[in-house]
Image: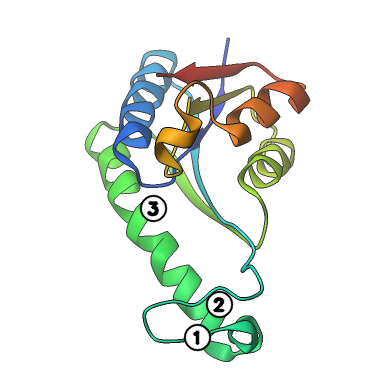
Amino acid sequence: MYKRILIATDGSELAEKGLMKGLELAKDLDAEVDIVTVSEPWAVGMYDAMGWSVGYMNSPEYKADREETAQKILQPALATAQAQAVRANGVHVLDRYAADGVIDVAGERSSDLIVMTSHGRRGMTRVLLGSQTAEVLARSSIPVLVIR
């Protein structure tokens, strides 16, 4: 049935639920998993706690900071997969919108199924169905399992 499953995560509490359901399915099917997190593009005029702004995305620190944040999401997810004896790879996509990154990785990795949650970090404004999830549903050529 499914031999390669892509599980999208943003590190949110709901994404953790999606991760667990995706890993459970992968274990039952003896499928390999790609756990994907996407760092969206840095918006002009954005500031962080350190006062970085427009020039930040051109600085050497930018990529390192984004990678460090992604690894804080991916490493615990990979440890969970390992604890459940599921073969898993971590993938960080930099400077893409979540839907684009998920669809691209699914194609690159020849995924059979995408597992993602109904909404992520954008909270109450996306309660019914997250815009990025809706975008993946609309554009994906492979099945998408949405966890609520």
From the top left corner, tell me how far across and down residue 59 is, in percent. 60, 90
Q: CA distance from mark 2 to mark 3?
A: 16 Å
**Residue bearing mark 2:** 63
Which color scheme did the rendering employ for the protein?
Answer: rainbow
- Find residue 75 and report its horizontal and vertical position in percent: 33, 55
Tell which of 26 and 68 is nearer to you: 68
Residue 140, image x and y in percent?
A: 73, 25
Query: Could you tell me which residue is drawn at 46 percent across and 43 percent down?
Result: 122
Q: Element under label 2?
A: helix
Q: Nearer the viewer, mark 2 or mark 1?
A: 1
According to the image, label 1 marks what residue?
Answer: 52
Q: With 12 as the anchor, is 119 left or right in this view?
A: right
The answer for how far apart the CA atoms under marks 2 and 1 are is: 13 Å
**In the image, 83: left or right of 68?**
left
Q: Which mark is residue 74?
A: 3
Q: CA distance from mark 1 to mark 3?
A: 25 Å
Q: Residue at x 47, y 46 (%)?
A: 89
Q: Three-letter amino acid code at disc 3?
A: Leu
Task: Indicate the amino acid at tag 2.
Answer: Lys
Q: Residue furthest top?
A: 1
Question: With 11 as the anchor, is 95 left or right in this view?
Answer: right
**Residue mark closest to the camera, 1 vs 3:** 1
N-terminal of the two: label 2 or label 3? 2
The numbered mark, 2 or 1, whose residue comes first in the sequence reads 1
Dot 1 amino acid type:
Trp
